[in-house]
Amino acid sequence: NVKRISVEKNGPIVRAIEKSRQELYPDLSEEQAARLRQIQQQKKAEYKKLAEQKKEAKRQAQQEKEARSYDRIMHEDQMTSTKDRAATVDATAAEEYEDDFF
């Protein structure tokens, strides 16, 4: 049940359309290759950006780890041991050390 309607052609409009019509025969394989190159470049740029972000995050994590580390605070030459203290029968050596500390 197809209904067909005949329509009058508008001469000047049809001529203008016919005049401006272009028959293109594009090289589809070249267009596809160009598109694939463009996509590859975008993926490469995105991968590079992601790698840079990971590198920056790793650098920041390393800086934070160093900031929280006691390695730069604690040095062997500044540390004292209980072995260095003279042992006495009573706790006078420890008390003297504590008094000196405060």
Image: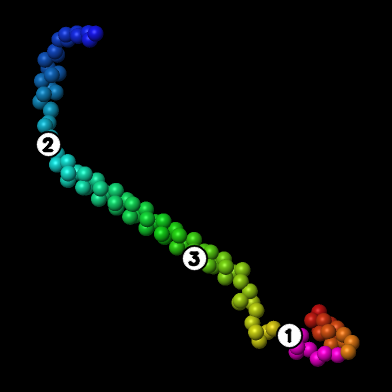
13 falls in the magenta region: no
Tell which of 24 and 89 is nearer to you.
89
| Amino acid tagged 3 | Arg
Among the two numbered marks 2 and 1 on one chain, the one whose residue lies closer to the N terminus: 2
- Inter-mark Cα distance, 3 to 1: 36 Å
> Residue 36 in the image: x percent, y percent?
25, 48
Please report contact status of discs 3 and 1: CB closer than 8 Å, yes or no.
no
What is the number of the mark on residue 81? Answer: 1
| Amino acid tagged 1 | Ser
Which portion, as a residue range, is magenta? 80-88
Q: Nearer the viewer, mark 3 or mark 1?
A: 1
Left or right: residue 72 compared with residue 56: right
Residue 33 against residue 86 in the figure, above or below: above
| Residue 16 placement: quadrant | top left
> Residue 82 in the image: x percent, y percent?
76, 85
Among the two numbered marks 3 and 2 on one chain, the one whose residue lies closer to the N terminus: 2
Residue at the spot 14% in from the left edge and 13% down from the top edge:
10
What is the number of the mark on residue 59? Answer: 3
Q: Residue furthest right?
A: 90
Residue at the spot 19% in from the left edge and 43% down from the top edge:
31
Residue at the spot 53% in from the left edge and 64% down from the top edge:
61
According to the picture, the residue beneath numbered tag 2 turns out to be 25
| Residue 49 placement: quadrant | bottom left
> Residue 99 in the image: x percent, y percent?
84, 82
